[in-house]
Image (tube, rainbow, N blue to C red):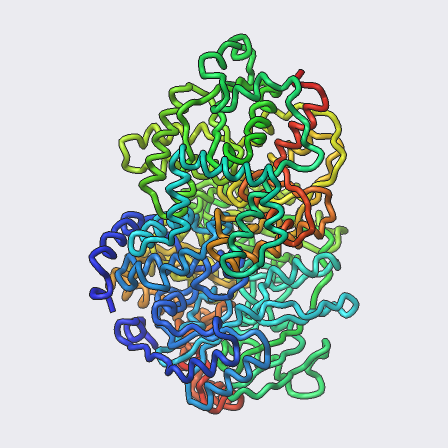
Amino acid sequence: MAGPLVTAGGVRLAGALEAQRERLLPCVHCGFCLPACPTYNRLGDENDSPRGRLHLMQAVVEGRLDASSDAFQTHIDRCLGCRACEPVCPSGVEYGTLLELAREAAAEARPPGMLTRSLLIVMGSRPLRGMLFMGGRLLRATGLAGWAVRHLGGDGVAGKLRFALAMLAATTEAEGFRRRDTAVAGVASATHPSGSVDAESAGTVPDRALDAPGGTVGVLQGCVQDGLYGRLNDATGRTLDANGFHVRIVTRQDCCGALHAHGGDLQSARHLARRNIEAFERAGVDWVVVNAAGCGAAMKDYGVLLEGDPMQARARAFAERVRDVTELLAAVGPRRGAPVTCSVAYDHPCHLMHAQGVTSEPLQVLDAVPGVEVRMVAKADECCGGAGIYGMTHPDLGAHIGGDKVAAVRETGADLACTPNPGCMMQIGAGLRIEGSGGDVVHPVELLDHSYQRAGYYR
Amino acid sequence: MATSRELTISSVMTQTLSTTMADRLRAIVGHNHVITHPDRLVAYESDGLTAYRVVPRAVVLPETTEQVSSVLALLHEEGIEVVPRGAGTGLSGGALPTPDGVIVGTARMNRILSIDQQDRLATVQPGVINARLTEATAPYGLYYAPDPSSQSACTLGGNVAENSGGPHCLKYGVTSRYVTGLTVVLADGEIVRFGGAGTEAVASLDLVGLFIGSEGCFGIATEIEVRLLPAPEGVRTLLGIFDTMQEAGHAVTDIMASGLMPAAVEIVDHATIVAVEASVFAAGYPIDAGAALVIEFDGTEAGLDEDADRAEQCCVAAGAREIRRATSEEERLGLWKGRKKAFGAMGRIAPDLLVQDATVPRTRLPEVLARITEIGEEYDLKIANVFHAGDGNLHPNILFDRQNADELDRVEKASQEIMSLCVSVGGTITGEHGVGVDKRGYMPLVHNEVELEMLRRARWVFDPSGSLNPGKVLP
């Protein structure tokens, strides 16, 4: 059955995977990954398991399966990319990297849908995503997004739109956290690239650089974070500053490219990676700080993404410097702030836990806030179904996975949900809103920031 | 014996299922739970033993006993073969498809139906993962004892089919000691119940016992009642490092002869230590060691330290150059790591891996291991050994590349020689992985024609049509 099945394009695509044979080979088909996979657990089809997907990839490489086939397209697309299979793999198969290559092969064989394509174009362009997020902030500020969530139907196009708006509404700052503007100007505006402070004037506090025991850091502004979670970027800068890091502004940085890599557009992902490497190199920072798990995971993998590229060595050096904000804070043992009395339902982001192996650090950050009671969500290590825009591309399965997570969050009876990744914050927040049970979602660093404000550390 | 040449997909054409049949199956289990497109069947072409591959005709994923019954009745009526499949982690090819057969998978039958704390019993569907049962019963201070090394992934249905063991079966025994009742769907769809409610099969012939280990040839167990044990109060774990396998073997013999009852006694050989330490799973075993011995005691706290001390003395007397003792759960997992990660580490040094499984009398271990090394050299194959030393259960890992036809041939010959060797010293051809398709050819080594005929008749009693998992176990 080999040969004629494979189109000219298929051969070329298989080539990309073929080059990664070394990464595919370690799979001994033991099946240890099956129970870790959220899609397999719910569907029971081995094609929707990591082992099955690897088998499909291998079949493409061997020329037994066409990359444009429904089987390859559907099952590769249906993967959440949560990488829960990686830590349980006894052979250390680099599933995340393989998935990206498979997605590229799939996308080249059959271009993805309009929604995905437009999203990737918009996210890859600063002016376009600036406009998109401006519109988003407008819908959010006017309360239109929240209103639409309550009034739109749950099926078809309306359902998809409702989910998108619920994600948007979920980015609203949590109740009780909306106080700011006073005496926080310094670092806050300096970390914001659209702010009026430029790189040179951020350096006008040279004494601070000298007594920054933690080193110099540059914060990835990101796309969604910059557009909808500006407060989180600000909080990241402020809390790091309060813990002895010197926060330097990094101009001309861009989207990390994770969305593109996950969507099979590795060319754009590489382009964005190069831009970021150049920008952060120019800024001369010790650490590249990220407050979004997916971005951090992608940037720690720049060395792999740019394999064979003239910039590979630089990409590796760059990747070595990437840290999640909670990693840096935990490393210095974050300063304790003022009490914030609340209970939080904590959930692990897949791209922190499985992709980066970061699990205790966010909890150490929460530990620095007196009065916070952490309640672990049941199956906190399982994906929330966020996975980019999975809720819109796979409404049924996405709702199933997301629904289970929302139920587990509510089961804790906590005041707030808490997870250190904007994507998961939006997904869980959207689920809570659609169910009408309300409930805000915060990033641990937001809580720490709030606690520091109360303690008067920023005055 | 069945060679891989007979079984490679290139030589057998898988028949597709008729549209009418597919529709009738879909009417029973739901539209999305019948897989018929050839592209989507590739993922099911093998289980944990990848040396054999056959694409099935279709895959059906029922959710209840009734659905299994209707599916089997329909397939039986049409004379279509059935291959049961759990998580597909088996290492003897027990779930290898047949070209004319339909896979009936238990992936969606993954509910724990009841946990009875008082009677220490649980009833589960066959797709429940072994380790999940222990997780679910832990809040009651109970656990499920048989612990195959794949327990984080393998299912209890598969454990029943293979009569699975694991490191701690040295003290606690294998699956058959824990299953007290079964609901079984026979080949023609008939539903029968054996045992139940914790009763031993005292009032009649032991059909539960007969069914366990039948490797999917007798029926599909759709509800499994198992006995649970109270979780042990304490655990002590030792790691002994030896210069030679001979010394480690002596230590094991001494420990067992001294009247101690360890929960587990595991040996990792030099070749395996080198592989593990060179991989990302480095466990800190010295790479010049001839063997590493993991010994574990569990039970009530009183006496555990004394047991561990005595085992340590046995190791020292046998010539151990170093003994490590765990003082925390983290350290305990560290000591086990080199054993637990062995399988995965092998995957990184060769594209394919054949994990063999045989049992020999404990005292014959050192000579058998020496001979296995020679066999590896004769056939120019890399063979590494990890094994449950306490009960003489060997797992020689043969590393190879399936693309290399000549090497595949040598793997087969070496495998056969190892089996003959184990049988010749008074052992048998499987310890816990089952016979499946891989060791079917070795059955005459341990059974004469009269015994084989008895086995065939036993199978006939359950499945006169012979359509359940054909080509497995019996030559």
Q: Is residue B372 visible?
A: no
Point out residue B74 in the picture as x, y percentages from the top left corner. 48, 87
Q: Quadrant of residue A258?
A: top left
Q: Residue at position x 49%, y 14% from top?
A: A202
Question: Quadrant of the image for the N terminus of chain A?
Answer: bottom left
Q: Which residue, as the protein is rendered here, is positioned at the far top?
A: A207
Taking depth in this image into account, of B204 and A79 the one nearest to the observer is: A79
- Image height of A87 relative to A342, above or below: below
Q: Is residue A12 visible?
A: yes
Q: In which quarter of the image is residue B110?
A: bottom right
Taking depth in this image into account, of B215 and A155 the one nearest to the observer is: A155
Taking depth in this image into account, of B79 and B366 the one nearest to the observer is: B79
Q: In this view, does A259 lie to the left or right of A62?
A: right
Point out residue A282 in the picture as x, y percentages from the top left corner. 38, 20
Taking depth in this image into account, of B192 and B454 the one nearest to the observer is: B192
Q: Which residue, as the protein is rendered here, is positioned at the far right?
A: B118
Q: Residue at position x 50%, y 38% from top?
A: A135
Q: In this view, does A104 lie to the left or right of B454?
A: left
Question: Quadrant of the image for the C terminus of chain A?
Answer: top right
- Image height of A222 relative to A404, above or below: above
State how many labels appear. Answer: 0
Point out residue B142 in the picture as x, y percentages from the top left corner. 72, 60
Point out residue B289 in the picture as x, y percentages from the top left corner. 45, 43
